[in-house]
Image (cartoon, rainbow, N blue to C red):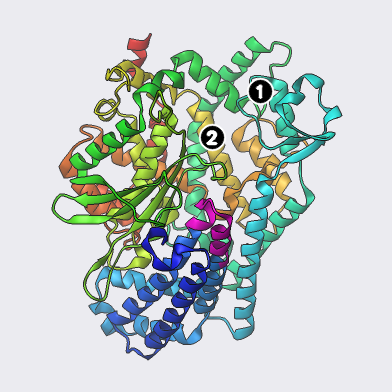
Amino acid sequence: GLFGVPELSCPEGFQEAQDKALQESEQLVQKACSTPPGPETVMIFDQLSDALCRVADLADFVKIGHPDFAFREAAEEACRNIGTMVEKLNTDVELCQSLRRLLADEIVMSSLDPETRRVAELFMFDFEISGIHLDEEKRKKAVNLNVRILDLCNEFLTGAHLPNKIDKHILPEHIRYNFTAEGNYLQVAGLHADCPDDLVREAAYKIFLYPNTEQLGRLEELLASRNSLAQLVGYDTFAHRALQGTMAKNPETVGQFLEKLSDQLSKRTQKDFEMMTKMKMKLNPQNSKLMPWDHPYYSSLLRAERYNIDPGLYCPFFSLGACMEGLNSLFSQLLGISLYGEQTRRGEVWSEDVRKLAVVHETEGLLGYIYCDFFHRPDKPHQDCHFTVRGGRLKENGEYQLPVVVLMLSLPHSTRSAPTLLSPGMMENLFHEMGHAMHSMLGRTRYQHVTGTRCPTDFAEVPSILMEYFASDYRVVNQFARHYKTGQPLPKNMVSRLCESKKVCAAADMQLQVFYAALDQVYHGKHPLKMSTTEILKDMQEKIYGLPYVPNTAWQLRFSHLVGYGAKYYSYLMSRAVASMVWKQCFAQNPFDRAMGERYRREMLAHGGGKEPILMVQGMLQKTPSVEDFVDALVSDLDQDFETFITDS
């Protein structure tokens, strides 16, 4: 069966696995309600969470990653049913009472260790944000709002990716071939951001972002429903609810962070826009005004012109085998960990090119498994991602339940004449996703509820972004980057050029991210909104980002992150700030420092979500960073490295 789960040798097995989980959870609910308050209460709650997550997490991956439609459909159904059960449990008054009795018992609470206390509080938080403290009528309303929000999220996601159609005669004949024809219509399915023809990019931008009334309605209802739910359960806004327990803690801190960052970036962003405008003028003198569809294209053109970083020059040095060796060597030096290939049994994997890795520590032994689903398949989603399939936890019999994760990438297959070769971007993504996997392997908590990457969103990206710093360091890259034919190492100046090229127009790129994050905060802030979502977009785009709003476009209807990262889009910037500080302070001097690796494991990875994120950062940096520190870390990363600049000149 899939992942070695016997029931899952066929799609129908999901029904069986799900029934088993629901049955087990009913017994655990009864047990929780009849157990006197103590550490055992938290253990039972965690077993309950584990019983449901074991099916839900696995199904979450299968519904996206399995090539067989019947498996995907069965997994989707299991996700829905387990989700409904979770909503029901989160509003189960009797179950909540058993936890409340524990939290109210000061003597028992003071005898619990910090992790157990935090897990008990996190379970209580889940009850509270589902409205457990409300009367029955309001509780029902909360459940219905949750269900409606889930449906709206799915509909919005679908709508965000749907192409727009246009009568082909509207477009000039010489650019029509860029779009898919369908009878008399052309389908525009994206922004064509890297197309050299300005007119194609302009047309794609205006057509793909043309407002769709239904999608607009969905977004407005989604934002209003989230706000109603937050207010119903006692929060001022949805952002206040979403940021509870994060590193930022509240919308005010996020607002400060984004505002200060925007101020620090503004001069640099202006310079970047001026460079892009000059470039556009050179290539297109009659139409040199910089527009939103120009930014990605001209910034990558400037990068390529200034630093000659054609991926074709780099790929031969980054074969998949070499990159995996590089990761293995880095983990072994930093953390005493090695990756070993394992044979899979029949039916254990969903595609024959999936590889299973055992993660083994030099003294602690086997830590868990990583399934590497690395290669392109026709109906495989394009985004690279990390899935927890089974969380680690200490079982009742004293054994440790080993974590299982999947890393999904979309790499090209090897050919007769060459192995799989990665572009620098693919290599960096591989390191990024491996950062998540190591967090899952080393966040060996007692409780499954806070294992590995089950931690606040603005901390979850720190381990993965930190790995990008390792991937950009010549000392690390030099250990593995070898030409697949000649064995020649990647020259140092090529690595430096690559790193410096990332700083070209990086301020403008970051300013765009600040704009998205600020937009997300306003959408999830005080309701009713002062203006329509499109008017807010126009106002903020011109104030924060600086490139003009284009009439009759509504970019927010394509902002799919509003679903998974509602009120938390800032997380990526804040995680990058922390990763940058950790890199500069702890690893920049010596990226293979074992003592630092151990400190990183002990302070930041080992706790999963079982410790407050800011305390983990404090433990690693030996100080509590301020909002200004976060901003400085991000801005100082934009400075050119003088040595590279001189040698390249």
Instruction: Please state which of residues 378 and 513 is positioned toward the viewer in this rendering.
Output: 378
Residue 141 sits above or below residue 178 on the image = below
Say which quadrant the C terminus sits in.
top left
Q: Which residue is drawn at 39% across and 65% down?
A: 5
Foreground residue among 448 and 548: 448
Compared with 540, 389 (above or below) is below
Vertical placement of 573 versus 49: above or below?
above
**Which residue is the site of mark 1?**
290
Q: Mark 2 points at which residue?
A: 511
Q: In which quarter of the image is residue 448?
A: bottom left
- Residue 621 in the image: state x and y as whole percent: 26, 46
**Is label 2 in contact with label 1 (beta carbons under 8 Å)?**
no
Q: Position of residue 27 (x, y in %)?
A: 41, 85
Residue type, label 1: Leu
Question: Magenta segment range?
Answer: 61-77
Q: How far apart are the alpha carbons under marks 2 and 1?
A: 16 Å
Q: Which residue is drawn at 63% across and 37% down?
A: 543
Q: Earlier in the sequence, mark 2 or mark 1?
A: 1
Is residue 226 found inside the magenta-colored segment of the image?
no
| Residue at the extreme front of the image, as rendered | 346
Mark number for residue 138? none
